[in-house]
Image (cartoon, rainbow, N blue to C red):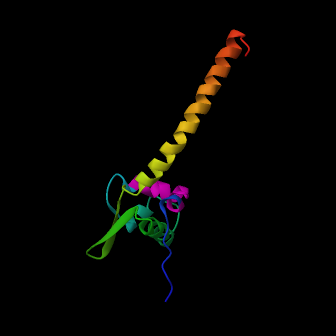
Amino acid sequence: MSAVPKYDVFQAIVDPTRRRLLDLLSRQEMPVKEISGYFPMSRTAVSKHLHVLSSAGLVRERKVGRETRYRLVPEPLQELQHWLNYFEQFWDNKLSMLKHYVENEESGATD
């Protein structure tokens, strides 16, 4: 019996198709058949992307009659938000230094 791979949020969102899927599912719950209409790939390929997102906890599926519907589960994205917030401080510092440099260059001042 093989183990089902478990993806983390970072692995799941690295692919642009999966990011588009999350965007699409953020609007409403949808069945695979409808989702597939938004992508230039087979329904099987879309299902594989949905499986990765589901494994990362970013989407949930439920059966409605004979179709499977998918919806976004945004809570795991908080892990990504926390990670980005930590590194934002470094960007803020670099941007402040760049602003200071540009303003001094424009005024002809030197340090």
Residue at 53% from the left image edge and 37% from the top image edge: 89
Magenta stretch bounds: 11-24
Q: Position of residue 63 (x, y in %)?
A: 29, 73
Q: Position of residue 76 (x, y in %)?
A: 40, 58
Residue 76 forms part of the magenta stretch: no
Total labels drawn: 0
Q: Is residue 50 left or right of residue 105?
A: left
Q: Is residue 5 above or below residue 85?
A: below
Q: Is residue 94 left or right of residue 67?
A: right
Q: Position of residue 51 (x, y in %)?
A: 45, 70
Q: Is residue 39 left or right of residue 59?
A: right
Q: Is residue 94 above or below residue 101?
A: below
Q: Is residue 59 left or right of residue 110?
A: left
Q: Using the image as rendered, state which of residue 50 and residue 34 is in the foreground.
A: 50
Residue at 48% from the left image edge and 78% from the top image edge: 4
Q: Magenta segment, principal secondary structure?
A: helix
